[in-house]
Image (spheres, coloured by chain):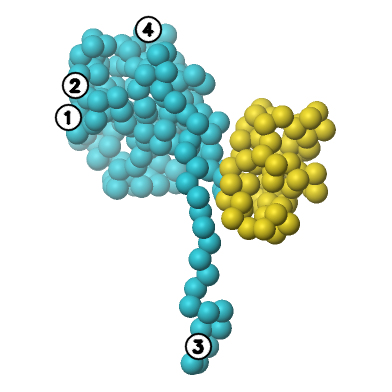
Chain colours: A cyan, B yellow
């Protein structure tokens, strides 16, 4: 196939200029939310959610630096309201030293988390893939309605929490 | 989705082709918009162009006018 030389040369390099997101933290939404996956849960939720490894991650939690949590009156394990300029959801907080001040993180393995309710209309130029890494948000202790929404969403989706000792 | 979103996307695409000569850049943007954008997105961009095309990068504007 490539006797003596590569048929189209040694390579074709195409510039891909960096285009920064226009998303900015503000006084109303002073934190940056970034989302990601946990290795053991990769595509578990987006496929069948019928494999045993789902037990390793019973719910998505919001990781937040101790300083950011303290000034908001949030303790480890509290339910919190996570809001951006486009939407809000509720999930449980985990105080995490590994987080930088000003940045919160969650996974999106459970539909009830509603991470995509919070993320914005920003997207990637080539594939229109939504921006999941930079969303300006505010976090505060959950209100009663947030908890009810979370329960309603779980019921609508037919979800029940997975017990750690489930078989 | 608002027209502003289509303008931002079109401008981001234009930035990726800006290293080329004008005509090649415009052709590249047109190819991208034709191949990868939903027809409703293109229609929204064209409507915005017809309304003056505020905020569109010159390359994106030229490409939109060739759709």
Q: Secondary structure at mark 4?
A: helix
Query: Which circle's residue, 3 or 2, is located before the other in the chain?
Result: 3
Identify the residue at image location x=19%, y=21%: A66
Contact between labelled residues 2 and 3, with CB atoms less than 8 Å apart: no
Q: Tell me the quarter of the picture where residue A28 sits.
A: top left
Which of pointers 4 and 1 lies earlier in the amino acid sequence? 1
- Report if residue B63 is visible in the image: yes
Q: Which residue is mark 4?
A: A144
- The CA distance from mark 1 to mark 3 is 53 Å
- The residue wearing badge 3 is A5
Marks 2 and 1 in Cβ contact (< 8 Å): yes
Instruction: Work out whether mark 2 precedes mark 1 in sequence or the reverse, and give the earlier one.
Output: 2
Same-chain status of marks 3 and 4: yes
A60, A53: nearer the viewer: A60
Above or below, B20 relative to A154 = below
Mark 3 or mark 4, which has the lower sequence index?
A: 3
Figure quadrant of residue A123: top right
Vertical position of residue A52 compared to residue A154: above or below: below
Rendered location of residue B5, percent (x, y)? 62, 32
Q: Which mark is residue A97?
A: 1
Contact, mark 3 vs mark 4 (Cβ under 8 Å): no
Task: Single out the mark in the foreground, 3 or 2.
Answer: 3
Observer-nearest residue: A69 or A125? A125
Label 1, residues with CA under 10 Å away: few <14, some 14-19, many ≥20: few
Q: Give x and y (percent) for residue A40.
A: 29, 47
Is A10 on the left or on the right of B25, as rendered? left
Image coordinates of residue B17 in percent, x first then y, are 61, 53
- Residue count near mark 3 (Cα–Cα under 10 Å), binned few <14, some 14–19, many ≥20: few
């Amino acid at each position: 196939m490539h006797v003596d030389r590569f048929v189209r040369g040694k390579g074709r390099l195409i510039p891909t200029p960096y285009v920064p997101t226009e998303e900015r933290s503000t006084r109303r939404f002073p934190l940056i939310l970034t989302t990601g996956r946990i290795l053991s849960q990769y595509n578990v939720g987006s496929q069948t959610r019928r494999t045993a490894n789902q037990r390793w991650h019973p719910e998505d939690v919001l990781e937040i630096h101790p300083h950011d949590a303290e000034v908001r009156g949030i303790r480890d394990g509290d339910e919190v309201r996570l809001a951006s300029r486009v939407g809000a959801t509720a999930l449980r907080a985990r105080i995490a030293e590994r987080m930088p001040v000003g940045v919160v993180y969650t996974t999106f393995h459970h539909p009830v988390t509603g991470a995509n309710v919070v993320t914005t209309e920003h997207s990637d130029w080539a594939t229109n893939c939504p921006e999941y890494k930079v969303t300006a948000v505010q976090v505060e202790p959950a209100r009663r309605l947030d908890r009810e929404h979370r329960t309603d969403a779980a019921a609508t989706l037919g979800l029940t929490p997975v017990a750690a000792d489930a078989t | 989705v608002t027209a502003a979103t289509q303008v931002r996307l079109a401008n981001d695409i234009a930035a990726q082709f800006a290293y080329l000569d004008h005509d090649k850049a415009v052709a590249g943007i047109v190819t991208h918009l034709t191949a990868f954008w939903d027809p409703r997105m293109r229609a929204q961009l064209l409507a915005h162009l017809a309304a003056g095309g505020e905020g569109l990068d010159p390359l994106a504007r030229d490409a939109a006018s060739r759709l």
